[in-house]
Image (cartoon, rainbow, N blue to C red):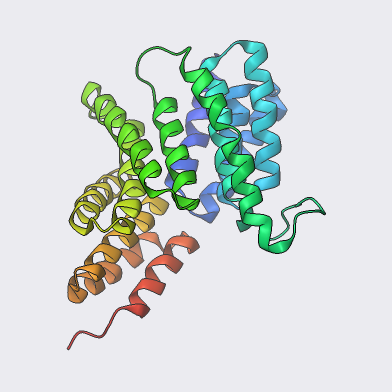
Amino acid sequence: MAEGLQDKLVAAEALQVKGGTDNWDQSIKAYEAIITEQGPSSVVLNGLGVPLRMRNRQPEAIATFTYARALALKERDLEAQLTAVNGLIDAWRTGNRCPTFPYPFYVEKEERLPYLHTVAQSFIPDTDAIMSQMRGLNLTRVEAYNQRGLLYNDMGDIEGALAEYREATRRARMLTETDPSNDRYQNRLARALTTMGVSLLRNGDVDGALAGQQESLGIYLQVDDMRGVGNAGAGVIDALDAKQDYAAARKLAKDLLPKVEQDPESVRMLTERLAKLPPVL
């Protein structure tokens, strides 16, 4: 890969990871500029699919990841194939967040979410098949377990979700041990801890959820990931709320809101939780 292209990809991904509406929009433009200049490739298309999904442009994300997968197959790039399938699971799982998602005419309104989950679940055997051919540690495998956990959690299979999250966390910790200064490794560990914390709380393990979310929040603050700060912060507040530590939950929400002001979704999550907390007497 040419040095100039690599620099542009790093810059586009940095915007994607930082999060926030403006950064995701700039990331989309950066990836599109690379495609215009260099032509499409699985790596660039996989990068583009992420901010498209984060901006709730799921139909475009699905088309982008599908194209990325086709190119990755042609390139015989297993990591790019798995990245594309991970993206497809995520985009289909969250399709209901797109107000204009093109559901088939035969899918009734009340059946839309099960439909999306069924399609997303259909890609899980593909992740198994690809991972069976891969060797060693890499972020893409961590993300595969995490995406599977998110899907199972949304489908109500909490034990299934926790099993996937634990594998994601185990592998992410191994990666961070190889290079503690790598922000991408740290980010994926934080993501695995955050998503696992949601399922732990649903499963009644309040202390486990709180510990994981607090560790995750510390990492997200360190790597300056606004959406991550919002997600983990919301998780910590939920756990503190469950422990009836309302003063600590209220203080944390107020402390975090200025840090995520550029990400409307994080502002929404924290503001809603702050409003629902009982007043501190």
**Residue closest to the eye, 147 or 154:** 154
Picture quadrant where residue 118 is located: top right
Quadrant, the C terminus: bottom left
Q: Nearer the viewer, residue 281 or 89?
A: 89
* Coordinates of residue 59 in the picture (x, y in percent): 70, 45
Task: Say above or below: 143 vs 134.
Answer: below
Q: Is residue 268 left or right of residue 167?
A: right
In the rendered view, does 258 fall on the left or right side of 178?
right
Q: Is residue 8 visible?
A: no
Residue 261 sits in quarter: bottom left
Residue 80 falls left or right of residue 270: right
Could you tell whether 84 is left or right of 239 in the image?
A: right
Residue at image location 21% in from the left, 75% down from the top: 246
| Residue for point 25% across, 70% down | 241
Q: Is residue 236 visible?
A: yes
- What residue is shown at x 57% (from left), y 24% (from top)? 43
Residue 215 drawn at (x, y percent): 22, 47
